[in-house]
Amino acid sequence: MAEKPKNLPIQFGKITNPTADDLNFLYDSAPYTLKSGETEERWPAHLAKHAAKKLADKNIMTNNPEEHRVLMGAYLENSEIGVIAKRLGIDLTKIRKEAMTKEKAKARVINLEAQMLEMKQEIKEMKEIKANEAKEEAEEAKKEKAEAKAEAKAEAEELKKEAKAKADKAKEDKKVKESKENKDK
């Protein structure tokens, strides 16, 4: 006679959501929700552990794995984070201070990069302004040169006309003089 397999008792886990936001997650394609401030004691232990991991992922302040362990323990045991950290021998204050220092340094770098980009943009704009000014000056010089050339051409034409008029007058005077001389003879 075959023996019937014994059913193992299901171990239930206790999970608390001390955050201000509800936790919504999927486990084996099934949706679960842990309301803000709610403690759930009817979930299997593996599901409670998964929910604690999701809460820790959502609320972690640094990417330090020790902080993650502390948060998961606090959510699973409904304990204060400080108590869990102390029990695990983890100094969360130190971890968070280091993270804040890194964030401040990162923010300073980002600020410096932004300032450098602004300066590059200003330099680019100044170069464009200088290039436009140089272009305008070149166009003005070209215009002045063309005006001077036209003026010189006009003067040359005027001088040419005057010279022709003088030459014509000289020819006329010569004709008049010759005709007087011919009359006098």
Image (spheres, rainbow, N blue to C red):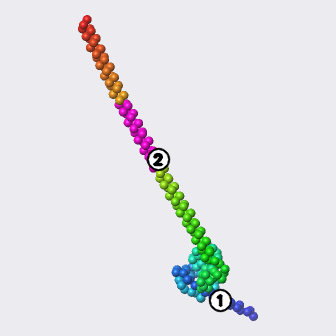
Quarter occupied by residue 3: bottom right
Which residue ends up furthest to the right in the rendered image? 1
Quarter occupied by residue 169: top left
Tell me, for residue 10, which label it has, or none.
Answer: 1
Which residue ends up furthest to the top in the rendered image? 185
Nearer to me, 116 or 147: 116
Which residues are the magenta region? 129-154
Residue 109 appears at what percent x and percent y?
56, 63
Instruction: Name the kind of residue labelled 2 in the image.
Output: Ala
Packing grade of label 2 (10 A; few <14, some 14-19, many >=20) is: few
Per the image, label 2 sits on a secondary structure element best described as helix
Image quarter where the C terminus lies is top left
Q: Is residue 86 above or below residue 164?
A: below
Quarter occupied by residue 11: bottom right
Q: Residue at x 28, y 17 (%)?
A: 172
Whether residue 137 is in magenta: the answer is yes
Per the image, label 1 sits on a secondary structure element best described as loop
To which residue does mark 2 refer? 131
Packing grade of label 1 (10 A; few <14, some 14-19, many >=20) is: few
Q: Is residue 10 above or below residue 145?
A: below
Residue 164 appears at what percent x and percent y?
33, 22
